[in-house]
């Protein structure tokens, strides 16, 4: 798999350091509260697990699976909920955990859906943010890294189901995604 990577954007050490910083910030911001972390499957699972371990507060996990990519490198804009929550969000402090925010269309749909369920608060934490690709303005409360408009894989992010297990985030070679 390493031969398929053109460039490493963030090393394993850089990711670990930034996740620790985010965990400390969340611990401070939610002091004395319990957080309902909602991971957006499948890409956010590795980031969410590491982030949860960096938060020194009670954390409850739940997951949603939504799709707008399929086997493409760009969002189709059509959002499908593949798995809904098991937890009731009403009255809870909800933290949506995303792997990457690109167009914002999927996240905007998810945010509006969750707001209608009356959480006490709702915030967004993303590992990667591509603001120059934004088509829908979503309020990102916690950013891991702001990145340029490159398709990336690793640390949970995939192309056609592959590369999620890479311990870094990298740009795949063009021929890999054709």
Image (spheres, rainbow, N blue to C red):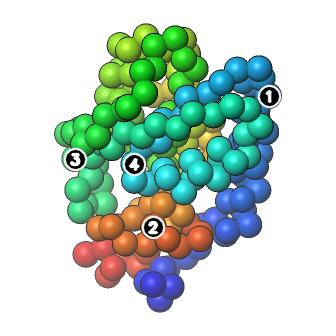
User: Front-most of 55 and 158?
Assistant: 55
Q: Residue at x 52, y 38 (%)?
A: 61
Secondary structure at badge 3 equals loop
Query: How far apart are the two marked residues, 4 and 1, measured between alpha carbons?
Result: 26 Å
> Which residue: 48% across, 80% down?
5
Q: Is residue 170 visible?
A: no
Q: Between tags 1 and 3, which lies in front?
A: 1
In whole angstroms, how far apart are the C-alphas of marks 2 and 1?
30 Å
Left or right: 55 with respect to 160? Answer: right
The mark that comes first in sequence, 1 or 3, is: 1
Locate residue 49, reporting x and y percent: 59, 51
Graded by Cα atoms within 10 Å as few (under 14), some (14 to 19) or many (20 or more), the crowding at tag 2 reads many
Can you identify the residue that label 3 sits on? 76
User: Residue furthest toward the bottom?
Assistant: 3
| Residue hosting label 4 | 41
Tag of residue 28: 1
Q: Is residue 160 left or right of residue 43?
A: left
């Amino acid at each position: 798999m390493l031969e398929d990577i053109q460039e490493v954007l963030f090393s394993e050490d850089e990711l670990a350091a930034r996740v620790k910083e985010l965990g400390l910030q969340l611990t401070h911001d939610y002091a004395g509260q319990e957080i309902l972390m909602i991971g957006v499957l499948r890409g956010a699972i590795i980031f969410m697990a590491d982030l949860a371990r960096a938060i020194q507060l009670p954390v409850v996990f739940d997951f949603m699976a939504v799709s707008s990519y399929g086997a493409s490198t760009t969002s189709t804009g059509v959002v499908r909920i593949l798995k809904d929550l098991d937890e009731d969000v009403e009255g809870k402090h909800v933290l949506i955990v995303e792997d990457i925010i690109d167009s914002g269309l999927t996240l905007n749909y998810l945010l509006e859906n969750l707001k209608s369920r009356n959480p006490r608060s709702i915030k967004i934490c993303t590992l990667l943010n591509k603001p120059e690709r934004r088509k829908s303005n979503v309020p990102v409360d916690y950013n891991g890294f702001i990145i340029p408009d490159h398709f990336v894989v690793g640390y949970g992010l995939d192309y056609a189901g592959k590369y999620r297990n890479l311990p870094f985030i990298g740009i795949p070679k063009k021929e890999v995604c054709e």
